[in-house]
Image (tube, rainbow, N blue to C red):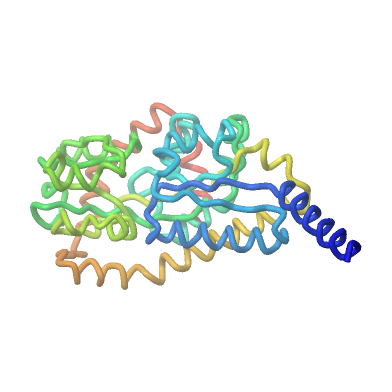
Amino acid sequence: MKNLVKTVSFISALAFATSSYATTLKLAHAAPESDLQQDMSLFFKKEVEARTHGDIKVNIFPSGQLGNDKQMIDGTRSGIIDISMVGINNYSGLLPKSAALSLPFIFPDRQTAYKVLDGTVGQGVFKDMEQYGLKGLGYPENGFRNMTNSRNPIREPKDVEGLRMRVNNAKSLNDMFNLLKANPQQIPVAELYTALETGVVDAQDHPIGVTLSFKFYEVQKYLSMTQHAYSALALTMNLKKFNKLSADEQKIITDVANEAVQRQRKMSIESEDKMIAELESHGMKVNKDVDTAAFQAAVKPVWDTFIQENGDQIIKDIQAASK
């Protein structure tokens, strides 16, 4: 009996010791749990924990629980957060040239965006992030940004005039809506529903999945498929934390991140028509008859401004990689 007690005690102690040495990673993003970002995070958690046999645990913090986009980037750099998923536009302060990835109409379609982001241009941006303590793991997507508003369908540039448009912190989008004679206002996405509901702003632009998961259909009547900018996310990890992992663990993290990104992109494409139908079922009026050429011509000065401030090399690189 004494031997049995000793054996049980030893096993318990071993289990405690093993669990106490497990690495725990905090993964943060701003989207609600109904969003594909959460689905991707759950896949990442499941696969990392399974492939490391529990030696690495992943705790997920959705809905901006660990701060807004800037706070999540700062937290990841400092190591308070281990992994974050944030729109690439939020890195333009650290890496001004990365703003090229958010220029209006820089990508004609998703496949071109994937090719550029997964190739030398996107990986070059990740390499540049390392000087700021970040390890790039991949570029999930939100999709193409589309405009919603409570006034009228948007078909041509003049339809945007006078709209109180919520924008993110991407300079190119702020410049774009100024050119279109809207009244752009920067508001954190966590505060946007209330701003739309109370009339602080009457329009916004986001990919379809965000419009659905944040329930903007409750406070917006029109969705216009302007697809004026591709909205990439950046999945990044604290570089010091990544470097502390074993070579096998690093490979698992990078492999799973790549698989998670590919899976999330595929789900985003496959679910788009269903999401549009769901928005329509909630009463949104959806129009696709947008004069894209007119919008492209109207916002061309945004590219000119970017080139004046940052040079044209990264745009040339994007265009070359797009072929």
The percent coordinates of residue 161 (x first, y second) are 11, 42
Placement of 82 over or under 253, stated as above or below:
above
Q: Residue furthest right?
A: 3
Nearer to me, 45 or 234: 45
**Rendered residue at 64%/53% (across/down):** 57
* Left or right position of 133 against 179: right
**Rendered residue at 45%/43% (across/down):** 88
The percent coordinates of residue 132 (x first, y second) are 58, 30
**Rendered residue at 40%/58% (across/down):** 33
Nearer to me, 34 or 316: 34
Residue 121 visible in the snapshot: no
Q: Quadrant of residue 34?
A: bottom left
Image quarter hosting the N terminus: bottom right
* Left or right position of 167 against 129: left
Q: Quadrant of residue 209?
A: bottom left
Nearer to me, 151 or 65: 65
Q: Residue furthest front?
A: 1
The percent coordinates of residue 207 (x first, y second) are 32, 55
Placement of 274 over or under 306, stated as above or below:
below
**Rendered residue at 14%/65% (across/down):** 285
Q: Residue furthest top?
A: 309
Residue 283 visible in the snapshot: yes
The percent coordinates of residue 133 (x first, y second) are 61, 33
* Left or right position of 232 against 13: left
Placement of 93 over or under 273, stated as above or below:
above
* Left or right position of 229 against 151: right
Placement of 29 over or under 277, stated as above or below:
above
